[in-house]
Image: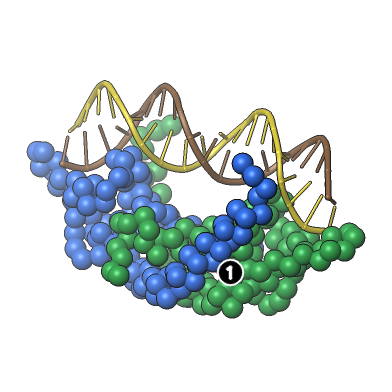
Chain colours: A blue, B green, C brown, D yellow
DNA sequence: CAGCATCCATGCCGATACTG
DNA sequence: CAGTATCGGCATGGATGCTG
């Protein structure tokens, strides 16, 4: 099967859509070294609403990247951890991180130059 | 500098936010083997509005990933191409593609199982 | 504690009309 | 041809209140 990116069903596109998500990245990283409870994740990942955390975790569970274990205790306790597949995802982040750290200076500089140029061309205001 | 992903300024996050974008991927791929004009890109990438194409190209130009050359002719002609930096981006897509093609079956199967299970647990309509 | 349901603001994006 | 400007629908995601 030879997928091309113009197809919505292209695996690369599907995967990118998932890992592109802000909370997805943070959750995977947070779970990278071990199981965590819902509340722990919430605290560790600052600024995530309960809704988004739940929603993102459901998506990851659906994709087979995260497992969800519910303990029938009172108060309830739910533990999340990466599946084996989920752990392999970490490698992707590493290659992105590698590119990012190597090139971020250039990107930021380009942005600065671009913005400066734009500003100098604007007549006034 | 030791960045962590919880920081909005984390290079990995910045880069992910950019390459995650649907049109960004398609544009980079379209430019992968050579310079293209605005209209060519528009036609080659089906379904992109003129607004989004312009907007995405501007972002890529600002980041130093794409160069924009305007010819002062009538009718106007504008050519886009990847910068050297932009071309290195392609490697990232390759590592994502590699992961995606290797694991997409598992992900789709997990989704199927998850949905089936959810459906069987739903009492009725 | 973990999560669902609801409401609502914001912002993205497509469609359309106009310009150098 | 390759844009810019504007309007509006619609999805995304935050805040709040309620439940097993």
Image-quadrant location for residue A114: bottom right
Q: Secondary structure at mark 1?
A: loop
Q: What residue appears at the point 81 percent right and 66 percent down from the top-left corner?
A: B71
**Residue A72 placed where, x, y %?**
13, 43
C15, above or below D16, in the image: below
On the question of residue A101 being in view, the answer is yes
- Number of numbered labels in the structure image: 1
Q: Residue furthest front?
A: A124
- Residue at 62% x, 55% y is A120
Q: Chain of mark 1?
A: B
Across and down, in percent, residue A23 comes to 36, 52
Compare residues B58 and D12 and report the one nearer the observer: B58
Q: Residue furthest right?
A: B74
Is A122 placed left or right of A55 in the picture? right
Q: Is residue B87 above or below residue A118?
A: below
**In this rendering, does residue B114 appear at all?**
no
Q: Residues within 10 Å of mark 1 (few under 14, many from 20)?
A: many
Q: In the visual, does A2 lie left or right of B7?
A: right
Location of residue A115 by image quarter: bottom right
Left or right? Give the position of A97 relative to B27: left
Q: Residue A112 or A38: which is nearer the viewer? A: A112
The quadrant of the image that shows the N terminus of chain A is: bottom right
Residue B91 percent across, percent down from the top left: 51, 77
The residue that disc 1 covers is B65
Please say if A98 is above or below B50: below
Q: Residue at x 61, y 41 (%)?
A: A125
Q: Quadrant of residue A81?
A: bottom left
Residue in front for this viewpoint, A87 or B8: B8
Residue drawn at x 21%, y 66% as measured from the top left = A33
Q: Position of residue A48 (x, y in %)?
A: 31, 45
């Amino acid at each position: 099967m030879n997928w091309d990116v113009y197809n919505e069903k292209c695996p690369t596109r599907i995967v990118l859509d998932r890992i592109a998500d802000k909370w997805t990245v943070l959750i995977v990283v947070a779970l990278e070294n071990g199981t965590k409870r819902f509340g722990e994740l919430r605290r560790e990942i600052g600024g995530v609403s309960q809704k988004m955390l739940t929603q993102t975790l459901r998506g990851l569970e659906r994709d087979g990247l995260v497992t969800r274990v519910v303990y029938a205790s009172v108060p309830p306790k739910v533990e999340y951890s990466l599946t084996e597949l989920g752990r392999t995802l970490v490698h992707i982040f590493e290659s992105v991180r590698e590119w990012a750290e190597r090139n971020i200076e250039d990107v930021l500089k380009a942005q600065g130059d671009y913005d400066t140029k734009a500003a100098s061309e604007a007549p006034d205001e």
